[in-house]
Amino acid sequence: MAPSLAATPLPSTASHRLDPSSSSSVQLLRSLARSRRVHLAHRALLLFRSLHASPSPPPPHFSLPAALSAASFLAALPEGRQLHALAAKLALAPAHTVVANSLLHLYASCGLPDAAIALFRHIPAKSLVTWNTAIDALASNGDHLGALGLFREMQRDAGLAPDAYTVQSVLTACAGAGSLSLGVYAHALLLRELGGDGDGKAVSRDLLINNSLVDLYGKCGAVDLARQVFDRMPKRDITSWNLMILTLANHWCVRDSVHLFDRMTRVESVVPNAIMFVAVLSACNHGGMVEEGRRYFERMVSEFGIRLRIERYGCMVDILARAGFIEEALNVVSGMNCRPDAII
């Protein structure tokens, strides 16, 4: 959490004199806010305070969204509330749609979906971005049914066609709610509204949407549909492989999960992460594949340099203990680089 604006001294600006009312000062503020780095986001908030304490501050409807973006990245709720108070004082919240959208994102990022929706209800001119931000605020904070309800409200009352961001949030909500029927509907809507060339190729090229579909079908137990989406993806990232391997492992497709992991590392040359190793060790555990479990446990450290933690030790101990290799399981526990917990 960044320190409070009121408690933090401003950085020296003697060698970097900016005209507060100039577009360059606002551009610098935006660049700092979009940097996705904690120290630069904090400097964006400090710069905003400095600019608005000057005799000729920049137009607040330009600078406030940038400052709110920085506060959202930092999940800096006290600073965000200060900015909300300023926006209200200047009659920009909830009247100005862009400023209001930035406030919605702030409250969602701080884990306050109720505050986001309360603000959403008072925004007079809701854009598609407004609806998308509100739906995502609910979906990303666990209120999956609320997100789906708000999506239905958008379709019924707003007359707005969903875009890729809308559907991605809806897919996330369907996955969280375990609603396969709504997920299939959202997938069909996606192909109809955003297919682009009429055969769905535009959708099939979108990595984030495809990952959301694999996650949706995996969580709803539709393993064949998840695999179908995965196999048709023209491009995959580490998340794509993680989701598919986890889906197969969680639904007892043990051999398929292990074979996909081997294909990923040996054919596709993708470097696995720790989450993926936990998935493949879980698959070995489900299938009683002790020798394979030993091999993957060894590769995790020797080949990929992944640091062993309690949950990774736990997977290996469980594989050995279930197969009756109690002495070997005890040896793993005694050689752990961390203290065993109650589960171990």
Image (cartoon, helix red, strand yellow):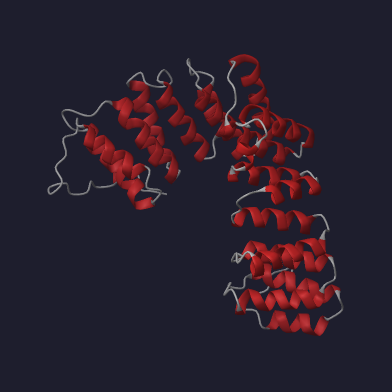
Total marks placed: 0
Q: Quick one: which residue is furthest to the right in this view?
A: 324
Which is nearer the eye, 85 or 221? Answer: 221
Q: Position of residue 245 (x, y in %)?
A: 72, 58
Answer with left or right where residue 188 lies relative to residue 29: right
Q: Is residue 132 left or right of residue 228?
A: left
Image position of 328 with respect to 139: above or below: below
Location of the C terminus by quadrant is bottom right
* 319 or 239: nearer the viewer: 239
Q: Residue, x 50% and y 40% (percent of image)?
A: 109
In this view, the residue in front, 220 or 244, is 244
Residue 177, image quadrant: top right
Residue shown at the point (78%, 43%) measured from the top left? 220
Q: Give the x, y percent position of residue 243.
A: 68, 53
Task: Write the residue at 74% across / 73% down.
Answer: 316
162 vs 264: above or below: above
Counting from the top left corner in percent of width and height, residue 113 is at: 56, 33
Residue 71 location, quadrant:
top left
Tell me, yes or no, if residue 338 can be seen here. Answer: no
Q: Position of residue 101 (x, y in %)?
A: 46, 28
Q: Residue at x 66, y 57 (%)?
A: 242
Question: Is residue 129 visible in this depiction of the protein?
Answer: yes
Kindly indicate the quadrant of the structure image that contains residue 75.
top left
Q: Nearer the viewer, residue 127 or 186?
A: 186
245 horizontally vs 136: left or right:
right
